[in-house]
Amino acid sequence: MKIAILGKGNVGARLGALFSSANGIDHVVTYSTRTNVAEIAKQGEMLVLAVPYSSVASLVPDLQDYVDGKIIIDATNPLNSSDWSPLEDVGYGAKSGAEAIQIQLPQAKIVKAFNTIFADNLTEDRKTDVTVFVAGDDAEARRVVHELATSSGFDSVVETGPLMTSRYLEAMAHLNIQLAVGMGHGTNTGFAYVERTGGGDEEQK
Ligand SMILES: NC(=O)c1ccc[n+]([C@@H]2O[C@H](COP(=O)([O-])OP(=O)(O)OC[C@H]3O[C@@H](n4cnc5c(N)ncnc54)[C@H](OP(=O)(O)O)[C@@H]3O)[C@@H](O)[C@H]2O)c1
C-alpha cells in the first residue's frame, strides 16, 4: 500500500519506519514537507496526519480533492503548543479533534490511532508492550488500520469503536502527557490494555 505521511517529525518519521518494515507486506511510505502536501496526499492510498493539531485546518484545502474514500489515520492530539495542555475547544463543541477533522473532510474515513503512544515507544524494541487503540466510524477502515499496526509489530491492538470514542483516546493522551511531564514519569512510558481469558464476571458467579 502507498502510505502518505503528512509531517516527518518525531511521530511521522517513526511510524513511517515501522510501516515500511511491516511483516510480509510491502508498504511504500512517502512524507510531505510543508510545500507538497497536496502532491503527496494525491499519491497516497492511505494518509497519516502527523502534524501539530493546530496545523490540520490549514492542510484541509490541500487534502480535500485527494482523500475521497481514503483512510486518514489521525495521530494528532489537540494541544496548546505553549505547554502541551489540552486544547479546550477544537471548534466543534464537545467533539474530539478527530471528529472535527472528519467534519472538515467528510469524504475521507478518519481513523484515530497511535495518538496515545509517545514517539519514544514507536521503535522496534519498545513497540511490543504498548497498546495501539483504534477508533473510527467505518468498521472496515478500523480493521485495515488494526492490521497495519499488527503487521508493523504492535502485539496489542484494540479497537474502541466509533470515532466518537476518540474523545476518550485524546483524553488518554492528555493523561499520558500529565504523567510523563507533570508527574515526571518521562516518555519511555505508555498504556497497555490487559485482557485476560476466562475469569472476570464468570469467576465471580
Ligand atoms: N511526540 C509524541 O510523542 C506524540 C505522541 C502521540 C501523538 N503526537 C501528536 O502527533 C503530532 C506530531 O507530533 P510530533 O511530535 O511528531 O511533532 P513534530 O516533531 O513537531 O513534527 C511535526 C511535523 O509536522 C510538520 N508540519 C507542521 N506544520 C505543518 C504544515 N502546516 N504543513 C505540513 N507539515 C507541517 C513539521 O514540519 P517542519 O519540520 O517543517 O516544522 C514536522 O515535520 C502532533 O499532533 C502530536 O500532538 C505526538
Image (tube, rainbow, N blue to C red):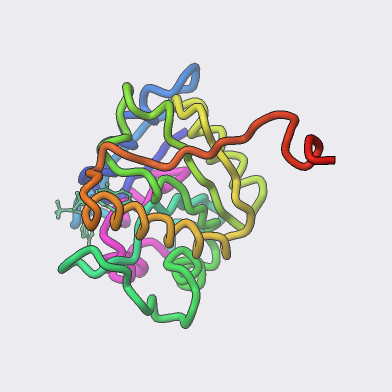
Picture residue at 37% right of the left edge, 44% below the top? 117
Question: Is residue 164 positioned above or below 195 on the image?
Answer: below
Q: Nearer the viewer, residue 163 or 178?
A: 178
Q: Position of residue 179 (x, y in %)?
A: 30, 52
For residue 90, what is the image quadrant? bottom left
Q: Nearer the viewer, residue 72 or 195?
A: 195
For residue 26, what is the image quadrant? top left
Q: Residue furthest top?
A: 24
Taking the image as drawn, is residue 153 in sight? yes
Q: Nearer the viewer, residue 154 or 66?
A: 154
Q: Position of residue 130 (x, y in %)?
A: 42, 35
Q: Position of residue 181 (x, y in %)?
A: 21, 53
Taking the image as drawn, is residue 42 in sight? no
Q: Residue furthest left?
A: 82
For residue 10, what is the image quadrant? top left
Picture residue at 53% right of the left edge, 41% below the top? 145
Picture residue at 32% right of the left edge, 73% below the top? 87
Judged by its main secondary structure, the magenta piece is helix
Picture residue at 46% right of the left edge, 45% below the top? 46
Magenta stretch in the rendered image: 38-64
- Magenta run includes residue 134: no
Quarter of the C terminus within the rendering: top right
Question: Is residue 196 positioned above or below 69 on the image?
Answer: above
- Magenta run includes residue 48: yes
